[in-house]
Amino acid sequence: MRKRLVAGNWKMNTNMQDGYRLLKDILDGVRENELQSCDVHVYAPFTHLKVFSNSLNGSGILLGAQNCHHEASGAYTGEVSAEMLASVPVGGVLLGHSERRQYFGETNEVVGQKVNQALENGLQVIYCFGETLEEREANTHFDVVERQIKEGLGHLTVEQWDNITLAYEPVWAIGTGKTATAEQAQEIHASARNLLGSMVNNEVAEKTRILYGGSVKPNNAGELFGMADIDGGLIGGAALNADSFKGIITA
Ligand code: 13P
């Protein structure tokens, strides 16, 4: 059985003070018995990580960053390495988000190198993939997501898959209020799981969690998470409010 996972991606939101208040509200709201049936992750801005790491210590909630560089270290002004993240410490990193692909030119290959850095430094990875509206309308969405998974993760060993979670985020559903229907999401999740079976093996296909992201709210989370191959959610806007984040965890 795959344990459910609800992960909040805060993106470039909250200053230090507002972020700290939100984290406290989340900590107050999430009960220990909920964490028994559902893992909870918070992907916060870099500036917040050290303070958050102290606050979340022993809480059972995993803290992660939203990006890392694809090289180990060096002359990359302004960048943050996976080793730096691990030393904070944080437990994970979100990689390949469509906003990074779209606005910062990240390719499957570069994201794959970031995955290597993260895994070498003991971080858990949530690897995001998903098609644009044009790709869906051109009926190429299955090919697009297959390529994203193969090119970004095809090089991993069986053992490395222990630390990978996938997140399907159709670009047209992110921040738009337009959620993929549970059936639309399920058919992509099923095909991604199928692909893992042929690309790695059946055991990895069965145990790897595949999250859905894109306008998940407390009122649609239950239906989405009820689908056979949807193992939880990657939450943007609704993760910025402790009540709605908690509502999604309860769902
Ligand atoms: P929204 O939940 O705001 O649509 O964002 C989804 C997302 O991009 C999470 O990574």
Image (cartoon, helix red, strand yellow):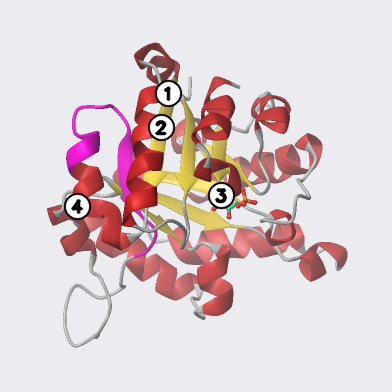
- Residue 26 numbered mark, or none: 2
Numbered label attached to residue 236: 3
User: Where does residue 66 sit, x and y in percent of width and height?
Assistant: 39, 59
Whole-angstrom CA distance, mark 4 to mark 3, is 21 Å
- Look at 48% across and 58% down and name the residue there: 11
Q: Is residue 57 above or below residue 177?
A: above
Give the class, few, some or many, for how many residues have Cα within 10 Å of label 3's Cα (few <14, many ≥20): many
Label 3 CB less than 8 angstroms from ligand 1: yes
Q: In the rendered view, would you say 221 is above or below 94?
A: above
Q: Does dot 1 land on a helix, a strand or a loop?
A: helix
Judging by the rendered image, the residue that carries numbered circle 1 is 29
Q: Give, as a three-letter code, the residue at label 4.
A: Lys
Q: Are marks 1 and 4 in contact (CB under 8 Å)?
A: no
Is 229 part of what is drawn in magenta?
Answer: no
- Foreground of the two, 189 or 31: 31
Q: Amino acid at mark 2?
A: Ile
The residues tagged by marks 1 and 2 sit, at their Cα atoms, a distance apart of 5 Å
- State the extent of the magenta-drawn residues as a range: 54-67
Could you tell me how far apart the alpha carbons at marks 4 and 2 are, in whole angstroms?
17 Å
Residue appearing at x 86%, y 68% in the figure: 138
Residue 19 x, y percent position in the rendering? 37, 49
Cα separation, mark 3 vs mark 1, equals 18 Å
**Residue under circle 4?**
50
With respect to residue 230, does 151 lie above or below?
below
First in sequence, mark 3 or 1: give its number: 1
Q: Amino acid at mark 3?
A: Gly
Q: Decide if residue 149 is on the left or right side of residue 55.
A: right
Does residue 102 appear in the picture of this structure? yes
Is 72 left or right of 251, judged from the image as shown?
Answer: left
